[in-house]
Image (spheres, rainbow, N blue to C red):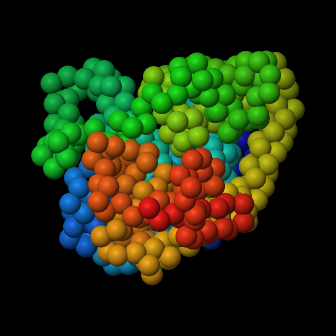
Amino acid sequence: MLKAPKTFKSNPVLLLGLILPVGLVLQILGFHDLRHDDAYITYRYGQNLAMGQGLVFNPGERIMGSTSPAHCLLAGLLYLGLGKDNLMSVMSSIGCIGWTAQAAASYFLFRRAIGPGLALFLALCILAGLSGSASWVALETNLVVAMTLWAFWFSGKSRWTETAVLCALAGLMRPDAFLLPFLFAVPCFRELKRKATKPALIFLALCIPWLIFSFIYYGSPIPQSAVAKVQTATFTKYLSHVIQHPIAETLFEPDQAWHIVAGWLIFATGAASLIIRDRRRWTLVAYGILHLAAYAFLRPPPPHTWHLYPGVVVFSMMALSSITCLSLLKVPQPAARIVAASGLMLIIGFTTSRTFDFANAHKDEYWFGARDRAYRGIAEYLTENAEPRDRVATNEIGTVGYYSRLPVYDLGDLVTRRTEMHPEDLRWIMLDKNALRDTGGRTPVHVSQSGPFTAVLFEK
């Protein structure tokens, strides 16, 4: 086993406890103002709930267009105290807390297998953003992965009650986390036998109320957004995306076939090394593979890369843990320690630099700050010129719906259905520049541009 440098050997938990708050503060400073249009869908549900109009996107239309009921409820609760303008920064900051919680969980998950020093390095890499966590702080993504990783830790300690609670909360935060109970069921029943009914009942008690409510309120527990997104890409295209994305996000851009083979060999080496040293962690490896395989079946639009984030986190942790295989080689221990420490410090340095660059750039990037400002410009125009019941049709609904408070017809079918279009109240059509095709000879009434992003508004 590789020995950790003396600095970390003394008390790595104390060092982690000192580093994590500093990392969290830096994350919040860098990304509290990150905006994501899909996150505004959740915020709009919370907004309407807080204003007494129900858990809906459009008042009076019971369609669940968010895949995160727990995030909607959290947004609604915070909206009561924060109001419209402050909610987004707090929600992004909460996403940063989820990101930091992932780093803490990764330390405890890997400490036994690779030693406390190397586990600390691994946690720092996650904290620095190796898995691309910064891009998704406005969404529920970081929170659900934090709950998932801590569920793995509690299960490894045979603390099945806590595991059941986290599995339920993670599933309510995002339904793909319901893969977890299938992984934990066998070891739980093997250890507890008849007593396993207790964590099972706790899990069901937390999940069933939402299922009953969604059946009664929406008519189905399956979100309309999931129905609209499922299998929109071909199997071949999405499978290629699933295979390449974790490598591109964590290691390098795979330009050639051997890059892909090398990336997955690194993953396999780390996964095998982890399981050999700590057999309880096979469920973590299985979860990463099953999660990616499930999305290869579901095949949502490939640009929505946050769907794959849980699998990417597992991939990145396995890739990092592969460095522990140096201990299996007949290399003098000092040399092994130098190579290991240098390699990990290089990774931390590169990752930190990449995350720092994104912290400075996201305010003007196409899919983040630039898009947000352009859509808010459209929302301001609509607030000044539209009637309260005018409906606006758009291909991206979150920001405009949240700020304008107008009824929205979703051209992407996430929060409305095509069969339920209301032509009598559809007055406005908003498209981003890339979505402009046949405008029917209409002349834009307002153009909102921010840097590289342009949004165009038409009046029907």
User: Where is residue 28 shown, x and y percent of the image?
Assistant: 58, 67
User: Where is residue 207 shown, x and y percent of the image?
Assistant: 22, 42
For residue 13, side relative to residue 59 (left or right): right
Look at the image and tell me whether residue 435 can be seen.
no
Give whichever of 218, 210 is nearer the camera: 218
For residue 144, side relative to residue 1 (left or right): left
The C terminus lies in quadrant: bottom left
Residue at image coords 25%, 63%: 59
User: Where is residue 327 shown, x and y percent of the image?
Assistant: 74, 25
Residue at image coords 84%, 23%: 331
Q: Vertical placement of 94 versus 289: above or below?
A: below
User: Where is residue 111 shown, x and y percent of the image?
Assistant: 57, 39
The N terminus lies in quadrant: top right
Q: Residue furthest front?
A: 441
Q: How many marks?
A: 0
For residue 21, side relative to residue 287 (left or right): right
Give whichever of 305, 206 is nearer the camera: 305
Q: Vertical placement of 208 versus 284: above or below?
A: below
Residue at image coords 66%, 67%: 449
Give whichever of 255, 200 is nearer the camera: 255
Q: Quadrant of residue 359?
A: bottom right
Give whichever of 210, 314 is nearer the camera: 210
Look at the image and tell me whether residue 413 can be seen.
yes
Residue at image coords 75%, 53%: 354
